[in-house]
Every structure is written in structure tokens, then in C-alpha cells.
Image (spheres, grey):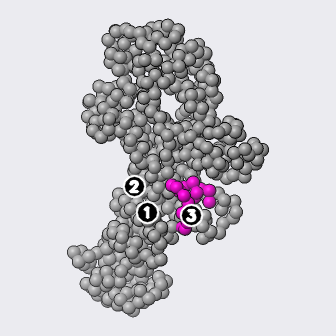
Amino acid sequence: MKNCPFAIIQSMSENQTHWADIYASKIIREKGDKEVYTCASGITPSGTVHIGNFREIISVELVVRALRAMGRKVRFIYSWDDYDVFRKVPKNMPQPELLSTYLRKPITLVPDTTGQSANYARKNEEDVERILPSVGVQPEYLYQAERYRSGMYAEGIRTALEKKEEIKAILNEYRTEPLGDDWWPVSVFSSFTDKDTTTILAWDGEYGITYRDDSTGQEETIDIRTTPYTKLPWRIDWPMRWAREGVDFEPAGKDHHSEGGSFDTSRKIVQLFGGQAPVSFQYDFISIKGRGGKISSSSGEVISLYDVLEVYTPEVCRYLFASTRPNTEFAISFDLDVLKIYEDYDNCERIYFGLINVNEKRKEKEKRIYELSQVAEVPSEPGYQIPFRHLCNLLQIHSGDIDAVLDSLAGISESQRARLETRCRCAWNWITTFAPEDFRFSLADENTDPVEVTDSQRSALRDLCGYISSYLDTTDEKEFANYIYKACADNGVENAEFFTTVYRVLIGKERGPKLAGFLKACSKERLVSILSRY
């Protein structure tokens, strides 16, 4: 595939249905035949890295997988922009008063007030680096503070200084007010205060920059090769790194991709550094169901990947993104939509393994989505085919005892058991934390007070108890439903009235899961123990 002619690649892309494969083909077509393709992502760890940030990470990873599936070697880099300025104290951090004294300093110099990491930036980085492998994302991390402070970018900074007027002209194309004569394409952190509240006074034409600390009035000249204080602003830093790393692909949010945004300026400025702009696309924002608007790290009110993995298994989490085009806005749901999302994933899996028939076009689309949803290799068999709603009922019947639920299922393989155990943990987290109150229930026990019933209801309950003892384990759901109706009819109780009575007796609610299936899911002994009290 490595030497595949571009005409064939074009033909392949026309037949591909998944956006990751289409973009992989576009990268090869536009960047030519290369030994290694570089795909990039990155973020400023200014606060908790949220699920909206993860959209960029997973979007790049899906394209990386597509390139590798085409037989290409790929370098997947993830930049931590930890030499950016600490601009705002997030609401979710301890000791906010202390943190406020570090405003305008590089975030890598801000202390971690949780006491868990070397500094504030590193705490946010480590949280992400620990969790990403669990969803199959393992990039090469680049730490920009380390690179800037080591002098690695000294030549890039000098190039920006040499090309000052050309960069300024490009930026001015998109500005309503042109940059002034005192503008410089670099910023300086003061060696006296560590803050960026400085004014550049002169550049000697080589590596020396003279600046003034605006808060103290002190001045000094520094060598950008040997001092760790200079940094390029974002709109110049980004294209400089594209050129240095030879980036072939990097998406960005719609704020960066807006007209006159940082992507528009960077694609021109990168040429001044001897590079070319990468293939890119715009991805849209993610909201949380029931709470609109863009998620913000600095607000502290965010949903992280950790939060999402409390409710969605790693494969279903990947599915949320693999099954949605990047330029489509969508919400992460924690309400009853969770049931549908799991069912959608299960249908995708059933299509992959041929358990349900669909037309060829949909089959190819769903199969590719399923492949890209897996953390590693595609499993050799489908998961245990149990509806997520029914799994939730079983967990509540067994009071969250996952082993008891798994032991109650017939014909489950070891592979299926391991996957279902993870799903059970997610389902129980959802039930106990997010599920609507009318979805939750618990079976009565010896400590539950009996409910008041009429004589005819009590007689019908006794008949039902007998039918459960005699027939529950030997009939299917449809057959046993007939015994429920018989208990009603023989005792002159309306069906709806009796169903409500049974739910009140078993779970203390007026309604519950479909009754016959619910009774079948419970153990005969447990039901008899409850009903025999009447």
C-alpha cells in the first residue's frame, strides 16, 4: 500500500464511508508519499482537561488508525502548551488565594495546591496521561515549557524576529485596527517576577532582547539561546511548530477555524518558517445534556473523560465519537439517553458480527465504526447479548452485586464475562448517580414494612406466589404472563390494579419493569419470601 498510486488512493477514498478513512486518504494525497506522517494535537493544561478537549484527541487518533490501516507509519504527537500564561484561577481548585498570586506567570511555575504533582500544569497533564491508554489513545507527549526553557526554539524565535514585518502584515490582514509600531512577534517572562507583564525595548539583530518589567521598572538584556524567558505568541508559535515537527494533520475547533482565526493566519505564517500548513478540519463543540454552551476548563465546571468512563465503557465512549462526524455538535448524555446509546452500540456490534441483516452500504459503515470503537483488537466474538435496560434491572434486583448478576446468566464465555463486568460497573454507576428516580428500585426484604392490600388483592398475591413456586422456572416470559392474568381473573382483580399491587409489594413503587420479565429475572426463592408475607 505504501507505493499505492494516488489515483488508486483517490478511488479508495471515494468508496470509503468513514470520515477518518477519507481524511487519511486526503493526507496521503495532499502530502505525498512519505516515510512517516505526523499527526498532531495539543492543549493548554490551564484546568481540568474536559471531554470537549478529548474530542480533538480522539479525532486525531481515529485518523492515525486509518493511516496505519493503510500501511502507513505515523508519528502521533500531543503537545502540552504548559508555557502558556496562567490567566484565571479555576473554581474547582483549593487555595484560590494562593493561586491568584501566580496570575500572569507560566502555568508550569504555578504550584499544584492539591499536593499531588510537581506543579499545576503537571497535575492536569498527569490526569490525562493516566486515563488515555484506557481508551486506546497513546500519543508521544511534547512539553512546550521544557522546550522553550531549554533554548530548543531559539532559532524559531530569531526567525520570527527577522520576519517581524511580514508576520505583522499577515496578522493585520484580519485586524480592524492594525498592530502598532511597538509590536513584537515575541513575549518575555520577566526574570524578576516570572510574569509576562513586560515591554520589549530592542532586539540586537541576533539573539539579544532588551525588555522592561512593567511592574518593577527594571530592565535587562537576555540571550534567547541561554535564558528561559522568551516565548512566541500563539498565532506564531503554532505555525513555527508545524514547520519544526513537519505536521501533516491537525484539526482545530471552530473558534480557531473561523474566518480570520488562528488557522487562517498560521497557514500563511508557517511558510515564513519554511513549512506548509497541515491538512485540517473543524470540529464542533460538545455540551452536556441538560446544560448548553461550550465547556470551559478555566471555569472548573467540567465533565472529564474520567466522568464519562464512569457511565460509558471505553468502547462505547469511543463509539460516541467514531459514529459522529467531527463538525457535528452533540451532547454527552447522562439521562435516559444512556439506554439508547448502549443499544445503538450493541446494534453496531450485532451488524459487525452478522447477527442482524442490513443493506450493504449500512453494513460497511457500521462495521468500520465498530472497528474504530475498539480500544485495541476487534474481539473474536460479540458481547453477551443482553439489553442495557434489562442489565440495569438485574443489577437492581441483586442490589448491585455484579458477580451475582453474571452468575445468573447462562452461556456466557470468559471473554464476554470480562466485557460485561465492565459494563455492569458503568450501569451501576449510572443507576446510583444519574438515573431518574422512577427508574430506580430495590427489592423488598425482611426489614421492609408490608403494604396495605385488600382481601381480593391478598388472595391474588397468594395465587401468584404459588404460580411462581410451581412454574416460574419452567415457563418462558410469555407463558408465565398467563399465570399473572389468571391470578387477577380468579380473584376478581383488575389487571392494572393487580400489577400496581405487585409493584408496590416488590419494590415499593406504583410502576416498574415489564412484570413477567421482571419476575423471571428475580430468583424464585426471593419472590416467594416476599409474597408469602401476604
Region in magenta? 367-382
Position of 20 with respect to 212 (left or right) is right
Q: Which of disc 1 and disc 2 is earlier in sequence?
A: 2
Query: Disc 2 designates what residue?
Result: 310
Label located before the other in sequence (3 or 2)? 2
- Magenta segment includes 139: no
Q: Residues within 10 Å of mark 2 (few under 14, many from 20)?
A: some
Looking at the rendered structure, the kind of residue marked 2 is: Glu
Residue at image location 36% in from the left, 12% down from the top: 214
**Vertical placement of residue 290 versus 437, above or below:** above
Q: In this view, does 34 lie above or below 409?
A: above
Q: Nearer the viewer, residue 277 or 472?
A: 277
Crowding near the residue tagged with mark 1, few <14, some 14–19, many ≥20 C-alpha atoms within 10 Å: many
Task: From the viewer's perspective, tell me whether residue 355 is left or right of residue 414.
Answer: right
Verify CB contact (< 8 Å) between mark 2 and mark 1: no
Q: What residue type is labelled 1?
A: Arg
Q: Where is residue 462 in the image (x, y as percent from the top left)?
A: 32, 88
Secondary structure of residue under mark 3: helix
Give how far across and how far down residue 488 sits, in percent.
40, 87
Question: Would you say residue 31 is visible in this rendering?
Answer: yes
Residue 244's spot in the image, x, y percent?
A: 56, 28
The image quarter containing residue 129 is top left
Q: Name the residue under label 3.
A: 349
**Is any part of residue 233 visible from this angle?**
no
Q: x, y (%) of residue 293? A: 46, 41
> Dot 1 corresponds to which residue?
423
Q: Which residue is drawn at 35% across and 38% down?
A: 123
Question: Residue at position x 42%, y 12% from top?
Answer: 222
Of callouts 3 and 1, which one flags the residue occurring earlier in the amino acid sequence? 3
Tell me the SS state at disc 2.
helix
Was residue 377 drawn as part of the magenta stretch in this picture? Answer: yes
